[in-house]
Amino acid sequence: MFSRCNLTSAASCCIPATSDTFMYPCTLQDTSGALRSVLDYSFATPLRQVQASQVYQAGNTRFRRVVNDLQNGKPVKIVAIGGVATNGTAASSPGINDFFALYVKYLKRAFPNAQIESVRNSAGIAPSAVVSQCLGSYMPSDADLVLLEMTANDAVGMDNSLLDGHNAKAYELLMRGILAGDKQPALILTQVRGAFDQIHTQSNMTQIPAV
């Protein structure tokens, strides 16, 4: 259904950027034209950062199902699970212009006929190990799409082991638990840099890319 711009070879479909701060349009097209208003976007983010965020896309089966439901006006439940950023902390207007509120607002504008229900579940400063053990309290059984933001929380107590990292194992268990949900929800990994020096330094060392 989709013929999408491959950002690893973005020069083939994007106007080449002359510098890292150049604002460049990149048109993502679908063959039916149904998603053109959703996929056309002018990125202000540096091209290299956009490329770095594209880690692994696979077949996108779950995302295709969610997009199909949005297009057809079916109920879609979007759940945000994470730390203080998910709660809207430090946003000038929490619940209005924090990242999750803006994401839901964009989807509602892009799919005006969709029945979108948003659920925000912040774990405060609890790490993935705690959230994974109490996942039923954070993720509704009928979740269709989950945004997971735990990087800053895990960075507070990040271990330096490359072979037996307890935080990495807990994060994997949390992801697997979400993916095994009753409706097999699609999952988006988000990340937020820590505000404090210790968190900032450690999260740089063990940064989990967005997918």
Image (cartoon, grey):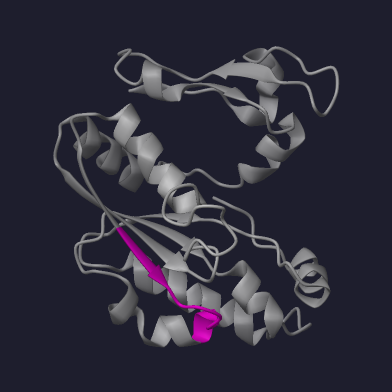
Decide whether residue 40 is among the magenta residues: no
Q: How many marks are shown on the rendered structure? A: 0
Quadrant location of the N terminus?
top left
Q: Is residue 74 shown left or right of residue 21?
A: left
Residue beneath the point at 37% across and 44% down:
104
Q: Is residue 134 shown left or right of residue 27?
A: left
Q: Position of residue 15 (x, y in %)?
A: 70, 12
208 and 89: which one is in front?
89
Compared to 19, does 67 lie above or below? below
Residue beneath the point at 48% across and 23% down:
4
| Picture quadrant of residue 193 | bottom right
Residue beneath the point at 73% across and 67% down:
195
Q: Is residue 144 shown left or right of residue 50?
A: left
Q: Position of residue 174 (x, y in %)?
A: 45, 75
Span of residues in magenta:
119-129
Decide whether residue 127 is among the magenta residues: yes
Q: Is residue 60 shown left or right of residue 93?
A: left
Compared to 61, does 131 lie above or below? below
9 and 204: which one is in front?
204
Compared to 92, does 119 lie above or below? below
| Picture quadrant of residue 141 | bottom left
Compared to 74, does 172 lie above or below? below
85 and 206: which one is in front?
85
Residue beneath the point at 83% across and 72% down:
197
Q: Position of residue 194 (x, y in %)?
A: 71, 67
